[in-house]
Amino acid sequence: MDELILDILDCLRTTGELSAADLNRIVQEHNRAFRDPVRHFAKKQLLPYYRRVKRDDPARWEGWQVDAATEEKLVAALQMKPRRTASGVATITVITKPWTCANNCLYCPNDIRMPKSYLHREPACQRAERAFFDPYLQVAARLHALVDMGHPTDKVELIVLGGSWTDYPAGYRIWFARELFRALNEAGTDRAAACVRDRRAAYERCGIARDDATLSRQTAGVQARIDAGTETYNEAWREAYAQSPAWRAASAWQTCGWDALEAEQRANETAAHRVVGFVMETRPDAISEASLRDLRRLGATKVQIGIQSLRPDVLSANHRAAEPGTVARAMELIRLFGFKEHTHFMANLLGATPEGDIADYRAFVTDPRYLPDEVKIYPCALVDGTGLARAWRDGRWTPYSEEELVRVLVADTLATPPYTRISRMIRDISAQDIVVGNKKTNLRQMVESEIERQGRAGAVREIRFREVGTHDMDDVSVRLDAVPYDTTLTREVFLQWVTSTGRIAGFLRLSLPKPGAFERYKLPTAPDEAMIREVHVYGRAAKLGAATHGAQHRGLGRALVARACEIAREAGYARINVISAVGTREYYRHLGFSDAGLYQRKDL
């Protein structure tokens, strides 16, 4: 391995750069030297090895004579999956433990090893299962993996997925959030290593398995009854978890109070790994003033909710409880509380048609009752053991052809406004789990290729298509554009830094509540207070306070906040709030904001 690293360094010093082709060539040459079909070296091994030598064998590392400039280029070349931090933050997704769900949607997977709607072969679910669904262990493992891939982890967005968050006991929700912050606060310390070791041992003493073979054997019988339709997921859950001595023993310590959480939040304000975004998942019918206050107190900044469709007939056919009025109320409240709205919308549900799906999504992104900030659009995938599987066997549901599906998603992409981001077009469901339906993981690429083939790329306005990503921004000029739009109870202003080629380098969401909002809801803010719901600057993630390639650290975020304050003041608002993440509180204090309950506030 040393010789391979030295050859890579020689290439860097000779040419001044290391392309992907050069790196692959050097790795292949070293593999061929063994004269056997085994691949002895892989790119993913290189950066962890380099970092390990630098940390544990400094004398050997000094012999390599790597200066700071060379090391920067080396790390960039060896980094795995650079898009993971292209948006400026490192994302860590964690999964809550298996739990019941108040709904039983026709298409929803019923994997007893997972919280309702998730499958154990999904990558994040596999990681969670290996970590006993423990939040501390999940964060510790993911941080380690991201560092090995060469990603900075100073700024972290936490995404909590699983069952509906608000269905879990209050003590568990607080404990889960506390452990996420604690894992980040203690990362890299002896205390963290001891906690990982002790926590794993505690679950093993309880008798909870984490390997696939054992779990498959333990759940085979109950899963077969679920798949046959003789037992519901909730009924099976009671047997597998509620009545399990092992899980009951673990649940005994999975609780804590608000004081313990708030202590970890205060520590995270200046920690080496700060939470700059915190996403929670729940259902539209679970949204209320009280639930949103709790989410905000936990530190959440974004709420994910499944919409799926706005058509009452389609919702009813799929046993979906949230009708359009419930969805509209949920989105009003989420926005008024300052959260970002991350919604899910599905194509090809039972009773849907391609034309109906196109019209349905167009209503979602044009009707003032909705207008999401972010959306996952993905096709309905048939998983065995669901009600939809029975509808397919009966001939009542068929998957769209690839041509029909791409046509729907092309139309949806073109209809999406400039203030909305299409985050995904597929779910991470294994092809092994999909009985029929789309199994292609490059669906988004297929959609964008079709848009380009039609010569309509210039008509795409959604955020992800336009974001600068890993493109350098060092010498690129940007202009500040404002996109105002009205929802039922707010005036929204989407401020965006745009390059001359139309790429978006950063944005801010400003929300100006209308008087009727305070007549309809009990809100934690006053009528004369505006709200900054999101500030995001793109570019490669860099260590806090450090310079980087890309749009970050050029003062773009500060300028966005200043302009938002001007707009709010000109509109007659006396104060402005920001729904800051725990790890960005210090940043906003430097901009003149002070702590004020659930938010940070500034007089205008």
Image: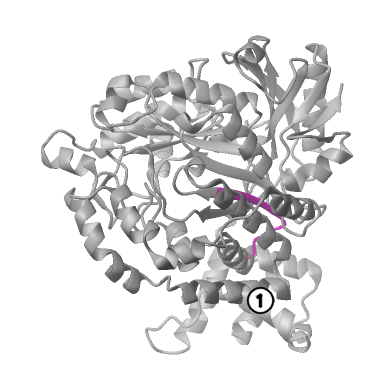
Name the image quarter holding residue 503.
top right
> Residue 138: image x %, image y %?
55, 62
> Residue 322: image x %, image y %?
39, 27
| Magenta span includes 452 | no
Which residue occupies the foreground of this view, 447 or 13? Answer: 447
Q: Secondary structure at mark 1?
A: helix
Of all residues, the one furthest to the left in this rendering is 394
* Screen quadrant of the N terminus: bottom right
Q: Is residue 49 left or right of residue 477?
A: left
Which residue occupies the foreground of this view, 323 or 593? Answer: 323
Residue 474 in view: no
Residue hosting label 1? 194
Above or below — where is 333 with respect to 595? above
Above or below — where is 582 with respect to 65? above
Residue 405 in view: yes
Q: Is residue 557 left or right of residue 314?
A: right
Q: Is residue 23 left or right of residue 298?
A: left
> Residue 172: image x %, image y %?
55, 52
Name the image quarter holding residue 2.
bottom right
In this rendering, the count of numbered labels is: 1
**For the point 40% across and 83% down, which residue is it?**
38
> Residue 422: image x %, image y %?
50, 35
Above or below — where is 352 with respect to 266? above
Above or below — where is 285 with respect to 428? above
**For the point 29% across and 50% down, which residue is it?**
235
Bounds of the magenta segment: 150-159
| Magenta span includes 157 | yes
Assess disc 1: are there few (<14), some (14-19) or many (≥20) residues with their C-alpha within 10 Å of its C-alpha. few
Residue type indicated by callout 1: Ala
* Screen quadrant of the C terminus: top right
